[in-house]
Amino acid sequence: MDIHQILQHLPHRYPFLLVDRVLELRTGEFIHAYKNVSFNEPFFPGHFPHHPVMPGVLILEALAQAAGILSFKTMDAKPTDDSVFYFVGIDNARFKKPVMPGDQLHLFVENERRVRNVWKYRAVAKVDDTVAAEASLMCAKQDIAA
């Protein structure tokens, strides 16, 4: 999936869109996507000016956005203005390698299960072949007033 297709399957936009391309997706099972980490990211001037590092919470958010694409593709649906997916749990989050400007952050998300509107995923972020972060993520669809 290129960026135009990604924009159809996520409600996020700049500066919060954290998925640049989807390399592989098996509906209902897994996704492999990536984010090109640029020195021009809006968070780097403050985190940290002398040693820029991508915040861990944004690595988790990138994984969640990849999970969102997997979920929408699995449901054969697209985001609407009357619902949103929220984090409802992040378990066993581990950060093993700093992500820095120039890195290509590969996002691997596997669907573990879905019960009604709650999805659980196993997620791993890698730079090259080294794990940068990993976690179990839970998201839930919530209807909202339009």
Image (cartoon, rainbow, N blue to C red):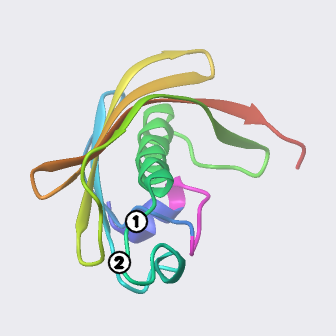
Does the CB distance between marks 1 and 2 fall below 8 Å?
A: no
Q: Residue furthest left?
A: 129
Cα–Cα span, label 1 and label 2? 10 Å
Residue at 35% across, 77% down? 51
Q: Quadrant of the rendered structure where residue 19 is?
A: bottom left
Question: Is residue 108 in view from this perspective?
Answer: no
Relative to residue 20, is residue 75 depicted above or below?
Answer: above
Where is residue 24 drawn, in percent x and y? Answer: 22, 48
Q: Which residue is mark 1?
A: 54
Q: Position of residue 107 (x, y in %)?
A: 29, 49
Q: Examine the structure image and report whether residue 14 is included in the region drawn in magenta.
A: yes
Q: Secondary structure at mark 1?
A: loop
Q: Is residue 134 above or below residue 118?
A: below
Give the labeled residue for mark 2. Answer: 51
The amino acid type, in three-letter code, at marker 1 is Met
* Residue at x 36% of width, y 28% of height: 28
Location of the N terminus (image quadrant): bottom left
15 left or right of 132 in image: right
Position of 69 relative to 121 (above/below)? below
